[in-house]
């Protein structure tokens, strides 16, 4: 190989800075699009998980009320679904092992709110999560998720 051929080969062998910058820009653009789609899906999944947990706890509360003739008081709270409360009405039979193994936290790591009597739901109790912001009220992802919806 002559010196002239080697110089020509070196010029053709690599990428220019402009080509590399274009590729990096395209990768960044694609990463941004994927990131926004994944974050949106995660938030939606958290809301759906909270709603599913509320339905599961509501079913356990309904089973409790059938066996115990009433829903747990606000003082007993959701813990009454895991272990038998101190006072059991005459003729009532608390299910051996409880109604759930444990009460889950909402997807944001906070306990579900149980209030008896219910004001928001029109039922004997309200059961809800404060949503993503952890505060009462809110809109969209920050909205309360409860047994009234």
Image (spheres, rainbow, N blue to C red):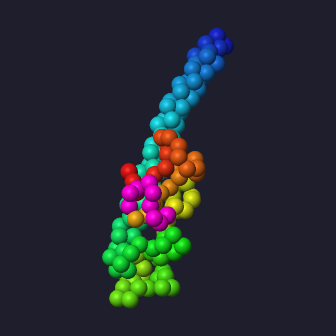
Report the label total: 0
Percent across and percent down for residue 92 are 36, 85
Q: Is residue 5 left or right of residue 39?
A: right
Residue 122 among those drawn in magenta: yes
**87 to 65, vertically: above or below:** below
Residue 5, quarter of the rendered image: top right
Residue that appears at 47% across and 76% down? 80
Residue 48 among those drawn in magenta: no
Residue that appears at 51% across and 35% down? 36
For the N terminus, the image quarter is: top right
Residue 6, quarter of the rendered image: top right
Percent across and percent down for residue 82 are 47, 77
**108 to 93, vertically: above or below:** above
Depth check: give the residue in front, 35 or 143.
Answer: 143
Q: Is residue 14 visible?
A: no
Depth check: give the residue in front, 118 or 18.
Answer: 118
- Which residue is at the far left? 66
Percent across and percent down for residue 123 are 38, 61
**45 to 98, vertically: above or below:** above
Depth check: give the residue in front, 101 or 32.
Answer: 101
Q: Is residue 67 visible?
A: yes
Residue that appears at 61% across and 21% down? 21
Query: What span is in magenta?
Result: 114-123
């Amino acid at each position: 190989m002559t010196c002239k051929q080697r110089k020509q080969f070196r010029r053709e062998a690599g990428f220019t800075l402009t080509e590399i910058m274009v590729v990096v820009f395209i990768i960044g653009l694609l990463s941004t699009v994927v990131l926004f789609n994944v974050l949106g899906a995660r938030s939606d999944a958290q809301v759906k998980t909270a709603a599913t947990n509320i339905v599961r706890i509501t079913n356990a509360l309904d089973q409790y009320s059938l066996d115990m003739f009433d829903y747990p008081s606000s003082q007993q709270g959701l813990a009454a679904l895991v272990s038998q409360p101190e006072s059991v009405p005459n003729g009532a039979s608390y299910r051996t092992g409880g109604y759930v193994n444990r009460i889950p936290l909402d997807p944001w790591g906070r306990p579900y709110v149980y209030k008896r009597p219910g004001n928001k739901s029109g039922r004997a109790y309200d059961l809800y999560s404060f949503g993503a912001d952890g505060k009462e009220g809110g809109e969209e992802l920050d909205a309360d998720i409860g047994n009234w919806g």
